[in-house]
């Protein structure tokens, strides 16, 4: 070493005292190839294709088992595979879920599962134990009923939340726009299909899908071929199952002319636009990589791509406009879009369609091509550091019938893509005139988007991709509705009897226990009301107050994690518009701006929709057409962070002190779902507003 | 095969060394100007991590100019003589890379992860940062507001406890302030203060260049030579910087020689004997890098204080004085910490949070810094919880670990966790580059990367008991009670706040 430094020292001066012009930026060296060793592949007697990617750099090993079945049409049980997938790690014949979790934690290992996959990674020395757990799951997962119930109810919450999530709604509409309902990609889970999913169907799904026949076990890391063979035989040798399920899938929908699909999102201040169509290409197609480069230039890359440049930088229509060519063996699609203000919804569509056409009309610039390629090369290379990426590649090569050196030569292939290639794939795959134009947004944009439909008739879908039921005219007035509602609340009492009954209520206190998935404990929501006009509410988690607010009839404020705030004049004026035990009774005289907009289907039932307009928020309240019970309340408020949506759903009305109140109250806010049960509801108990200050 | 296994078992029973750790190879050498270079070749992925560790952290700051080290972490992305403002990150990103930096009490660390065919770009970028970054008012103004925003985001409930702890543990040492520093100091500082800091600490002798990944060692050395060895040595570096930034008159004033005599593109061959002599003289005059002496103060009493914060739940924090990161007891101390309060299944979590429900959360940190250490325990109490009761529970647990050996199962679990963590920390080239540099500068040599795990695994249950007795001194510790703002007055009078 010493000698070496000396030698270096002798050579250095010539270089050191040479000249250097630092303003010259270094050029990239030639693109490197990747040293992924060819994987060893062997098949077991029971039909598992084992792919071994040996890598002794670190004493870690991972096993990734994927089923060979193709996606299956789920029909009236749409969503079954997803539900089953989230239940695979819920316990086995030999171990409870807790025992499984603890055993994994003790080793510092990881075990994961999805609807078609189970994977485990750990330090090499824990391999036997880890594989023991993994094979136990694969062969003996037993889907305890309690866990099935928990996951199904979680999915119910997800479905309800979908109605407030434009991106989900858009995804569902895209699915049915691009694929027929007889294709797995055209299926969307609904409450109806979820109702049909039970433990028996989950077990059946698992048995049929998790079979060694046609499955792939990708082994990566610090393990030899011989050790792999022994480990696989020991842990998976006795695994048996039926034949692998391979379905002939029907084709995607063909799109002739532009077709506009609208999904109503009441009160939305922006449109989620997605221009989409099926692509006739599989990953093994030699055009695939070229198409991905094209996608990067158009709207898939990070920098100055065309959609971003045009719609964000030049026009200022949006924060983000992107494209994505999603290519797989069962159904590929292209989509482009983003979120746009209502008033530019049509202009945005014009520009996106224009960009889809423009890229077919001429060669791209050298600069945009080279930047896109560099950025793709970099993220490809960085992704390789994770052993799981290498595993995914090995599997892709087999499943997608790619050349064996596909990933080794990926960077060179990428470098070789030319402007002419881009134009060729653009002309072959891009179109601005045979597209599904999916818009999720406010009804007021319908007039702006109808013109894009080739036959002038737009289709309306609901949140789950079903044909939307047209809104019906209400058969009663708003005031009649509120009267019916008050009567229902008072269990039939009307007029003087109702007034007398109301007078008897001095205070009302409710404690609701709300559960948040993943949170360490429940949220306790306490609300109080007094006949003198005081109101208080607070939310606590594990003894910590997250949020609280109070109003004494004249003034009030809020506090908690967000800091203390005093109610503004404007807020006080609005607060005063909803007073009383049943505020709805008083809307006519309180100055509330309310309007009955019609009858819509909410959660499968026809409901009257009452729209309340206040200065900074709009609320849609849904009343069951038969029972007049309020089933949901969707509030959209303008905040500094943009539009915030809060949805409450109500069910299980029960009598308390002569009034009906819901016992089940769920809350959906910013992607979070809290399922609440009333813990106590008391009339005329002592309450103290100070607790809420 | 059988024999091998038996030998393996024998070895394992004698020493746990190297059970799961694979040797990480590297080459290291010094450049003439003092830059220490460490190269690790790992060619399985075509990417490379280029990093420079500057041996400067908040402990090198003057007490009226705190926050400088961290401020530079932001400022030095502003560009250089050859890189436009804002272009630094863009160059990395559009060439397929990613970059970041971080600052602590002891160091400032910069890195890029690039496709390996962009190694030269990474070297050029880092050499530009070291040689002649833009340190001027425009950039200072921009970054001041960025840093202030960062400070605002960091001012979360309880977050002041580290500073409250350190300022009492080491009241006469720069460890008493936090790397984020004081915004008033940053505001009060002038361009000259910033320039001086750059000229003092951003110099070759204070830098460790570590490159890990898909590299050819010979070629990499060639490029390092080109971009880094060409950075002037000693005081000559600042002559170079002045040549670029000073007007002729000022330059003449300082050096007595015209700028004309020098050429930045051929700096080592100035025109004329006088210029050559000056360059030679300055090259051989090292830049003095001020470093604080180790804190001398020994904590000998219980210091208790009440801190009122914008919080809802009370919290207890306790700190004990421990040695610096290189001390051999640090391994056992860290493992002890984890047995007590690291993670959901640790002793204190089980008792305080799960069983007694006195706290919503409990945790422990073992700070091993370059010149001192702190073992820190904390718990956020349930609403209305008396903090003294939490403290008693901590004390019971501390006494237990001092009186009895931990169970074999706890011992194995904590060993598994350390083994997994250390192996994982070397699973990426960026992680390896950082560990190599850290070990070189702070832990007595880069080689520590290969021995660290065995150091942890050689800790015995008896060691854990021993360090618990030695360092968890109940009569010499700092106890902080964090209380919500409202419940103020009388308690704060009791405290020594």
Image (cartoon, coloured by chain):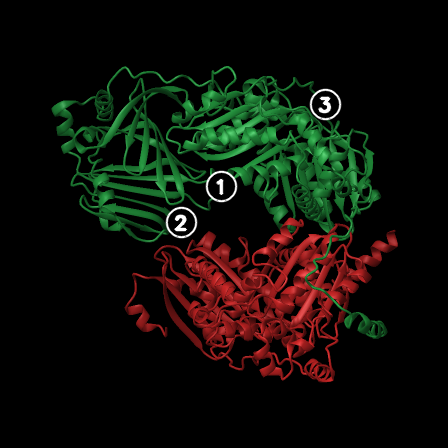
Give the residue at mark 1.
A319
Which residue is nearer to you in this view: A172 or B379?
A172
Q: Residue at x 14, y 23 (%)?
A: A495
First of labels 2, 3 by sequence position? 3
Q: Is residue A557 shown left or right of residue B377?
A: left
Q: Is residue A144 visible?
A: no
Give the residue at mark 3.
A242
Q: Is residue A133 shown left or right of residue A318?
A: right
| Viewport quadrant of the C terminus of chain B | bottom left
Which residue is nearer to you in this view: B328 or A336?
A336
**Which type of secondary structure does the marked residue at label 3 adopt?**
loop
**Which type of secondary structure does the marked residue at label 2 adopt?**
loop
Q: Residue at x 58, y 74 (%)?
A: B246
- What is the chain letter for disc 1? A
- What is the chain letter for disc 2? A
| Chain the render paints green | A
Q: Is residue A74 above or below residue A348?
A: above
Query: Residue A83: horizontal and vertical position, in percent?
Result: 56, 29
First of labels 1, 2 by sequence position? 1
Q: Is residue A672 shown left or right of residue A415?
A: left
């Amino acid at each position: 070493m010493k000698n070496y430094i000396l030698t270096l020292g002798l050579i250095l001066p010539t270089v050191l005292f040479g000249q250097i012009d630092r303003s010259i930026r270094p050029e990239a060296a030639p693109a490197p190839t990747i040293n992924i060793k060819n994987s060893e592949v062997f098949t077991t007697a029971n039909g598992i294709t084992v792919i071994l990617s040996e890598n002794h750099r670190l004493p870690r090993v991972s096993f990734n088992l994927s089923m060979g079945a193709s996606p299956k049409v789920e029909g009236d049980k749409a969503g079954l595979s997803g539900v089953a997938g989230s239940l695979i790690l819920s316990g086995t014949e030999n171990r409870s879920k807790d025992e499984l979790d603890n055993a994994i934690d003790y080793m510092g290992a990881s075990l994961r599962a999805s609807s078609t996959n189970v994977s485990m990674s750990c330090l090499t020395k824990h391999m036997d134990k880890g594989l023991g757990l993994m094979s136990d799951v694969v062969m003996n997962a037993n889907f305890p009923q309690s866990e099935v119930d928990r996951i199904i109810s979680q999915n119910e919450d997800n479905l309800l939340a979908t109605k407030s999530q434009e991106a989900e709604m858009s995804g569902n509409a895209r699915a049915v726009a691009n694929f027929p309902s007889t294709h797995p990609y055209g299926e969307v889970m609904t409450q109806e299909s979820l109702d049909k999913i039970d433990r028996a169907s989950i077990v059946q799904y698992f048995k049929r899908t998790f079979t060694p026949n046609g499955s792939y076990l990708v082994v990566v890391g610090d393990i030899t071929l011989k050790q792999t063979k022994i480990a696989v035989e020991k842990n998976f040798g006795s695994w048996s199952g039926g034949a692998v399920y391979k379905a002939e899938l029907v084709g995607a929908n063909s799109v002739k002319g532009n077709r506009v699909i609208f999904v109503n999102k009441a009160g939305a201040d922006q449109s989620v636009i997605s221009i989409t169509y099926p692509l006739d290409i599989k990953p093994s197609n030699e055009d695939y990589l070229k198409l991905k480069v094209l996608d990067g230039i158009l709207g898939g890359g990070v920098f100055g791509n065309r959609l971003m440049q045009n719609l964000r930088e030049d026009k200022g229509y949006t924060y983000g406009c992107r494209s994505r060519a999603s290519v797989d063996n069962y159904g590929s699609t292209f989509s482009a879009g983003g979120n746009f203000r209502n008033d530019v919804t049509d202009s945005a569509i014009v520009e996106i369609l224009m960009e889809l056409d423009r890229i077919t009309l001429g060669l791209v610039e050298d600069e945009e091509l080279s930047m896109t390629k560099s950025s793709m090369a970099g993220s490809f290379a960085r992704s390789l550091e994770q052993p799981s990426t290498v595993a995914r590649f090995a599997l892709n090569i087999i499943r997608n019938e790619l050349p064996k050196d596909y990933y080794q030569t990926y960077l060179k292939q990428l470098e070789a893509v030319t402007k002419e290639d881009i134009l060729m794939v653009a002309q072959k795959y891009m179109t601005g005139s045979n597209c599904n134009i999916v818009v999720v947004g406010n009804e007021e944009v319908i007039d702006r988007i109808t013109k894009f439909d080739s036959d002038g008739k737009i289709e309306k879908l609901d949140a789950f991709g079903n044909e939307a039921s047209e809104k019906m005219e209400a058969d009663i007035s708003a005031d009649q509705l509120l009267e019916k509602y008050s009567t229902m609340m008072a269990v039939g009492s009307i007029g003087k009897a109702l007034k007398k009954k109301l007078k008897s209520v001095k205070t009302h206190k409710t404690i609701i226990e709300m559960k948040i998935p993943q949170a360490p404990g429940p949220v306790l929501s306490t609300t109080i009301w007094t006949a003198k006009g005081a109101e208080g509410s607070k939310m606590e988690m594990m003894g910590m107050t997250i949020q609280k607010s109070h109003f004494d009839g004249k003034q009030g404020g809020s506090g908690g994690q967000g800091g203390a705030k005093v109610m503004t004049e404007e807020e006080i004026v609005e607060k005063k518009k909803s007073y009383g035990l049943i505020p709805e009774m008083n809307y006519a005289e309180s100055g509330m701006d309310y309007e009955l907009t019609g009858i819509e289907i909410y959660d499968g039932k026809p409901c009257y929709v009452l729209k309340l307009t206040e200065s900074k928020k709009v609320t849609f309240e849904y009343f069951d057409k038969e029972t007049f019970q309020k089933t949901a309340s969707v509030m959209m408020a303008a905040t500094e962070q943009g539009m915030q949506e809060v949805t409450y759903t109500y069910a299980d009305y029960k009598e308390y002190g002569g009034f009906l109140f819901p016992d089940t109250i769920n809350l959906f806010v910013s992607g979070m779902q809290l399922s609440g049960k009333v813990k106590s509801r008391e009339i005329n108990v002592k309450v103290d507003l100070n607790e809420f200050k | 095969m059988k024999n091998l296994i038996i030998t393996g078992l024998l070895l394992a029973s004698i020493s746990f060394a190297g059970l799961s750790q694979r040797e990480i190879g590297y080459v290291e050498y010094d450049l003439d100007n003092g830059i220490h270079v460490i190269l690790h070749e790992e060619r399985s992925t075509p990417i490379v991590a280029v990093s420079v560790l500057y041996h400067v952290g908040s402990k090198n700051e003057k007490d009226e100019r705190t926050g400088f080290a961290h401020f530079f972490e932001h400022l030095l992305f502003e560009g250089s003589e050859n890189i436009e403002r804002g272009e630094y990150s863009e160059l990395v990103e559009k060439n397929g890379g990613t970059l970041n930096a971080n600052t602590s009490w002891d160091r400032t660390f910069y890195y890029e992860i690039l496709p390996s065919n962009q190694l030269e770009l990474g070297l050029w970028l880092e050499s530009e940062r070291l040689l002649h970054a833009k340190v001027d008012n425009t950039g200072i103004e921009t970054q001041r507001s960025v840093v202030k925003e960062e400070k605002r985001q960091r001012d979360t409930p309880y977050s002041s406890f580290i500073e409250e702890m350190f300022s009492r543990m080491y009241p006469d040492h720069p460890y008493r302030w936090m790397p984020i520093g004081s915004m008033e100091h940053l505001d009060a500082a002038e361009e000259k203060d910033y320039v001086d800091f750059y000229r003092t600490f951003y110099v070759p002798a204070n830098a460790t260049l570590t490159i890990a990944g898909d590299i050819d060692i010979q070629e990499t050395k060639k490029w390092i030579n080109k971009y880094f060895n060409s950075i002037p040595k000693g005081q000559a570096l600042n002559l170079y910087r002045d040549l670029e930034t000073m007007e002729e008159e000022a330059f003449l004033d300082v050096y007595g020689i015209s700028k004309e005599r020098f050429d930045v593109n051929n700096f080592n061959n100035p025109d004329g004997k006088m210029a050559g002599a000056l360059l030679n003289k300055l090259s051989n005059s090292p830049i003095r890098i001020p470093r604080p002496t180790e804190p001398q103060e020994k904590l000998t009493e219980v210091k208790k204080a009440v801190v009122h914060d914008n919080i809802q739940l009370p919290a207890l924090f306790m700190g004990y004085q421990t040695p610096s990161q290189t001390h051999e007891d640090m391994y056992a101390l860290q493992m002890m910490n984890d047995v007590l309060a690291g993670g959901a299944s640790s002793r204190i979590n089980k008792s305080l949070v799960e069983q007694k429900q006195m706290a919503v959360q409990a945790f422990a940190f073992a700070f091993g810094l370059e010149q001192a250490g702190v073992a820190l325990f904390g718990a956020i109490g349930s609403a209305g919880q008396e903090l003294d009761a939490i403290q008693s529970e901590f004390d019971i647990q501390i006494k237990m670990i001092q009186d009895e050996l931990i169970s074999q199962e706890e011992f194995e679990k904590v060993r598994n966790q350390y083994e997994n963590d250390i192996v994982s920390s070397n699973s990426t080239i960026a992680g390896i580059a950082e560990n190599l540099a850290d070990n070189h500068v702070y832990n007595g040599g880069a080689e520590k990367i290969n021995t660290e795990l065995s150091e942890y695994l050689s800790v015995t249950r008896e060691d854990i008991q021993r360090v618990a007795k030695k360092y968890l001194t109940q009569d010499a510790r700092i106890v902080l009670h964090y209380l919500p703002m409202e419940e103020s007055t009388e308690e704060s009078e009791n405290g020594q706040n």
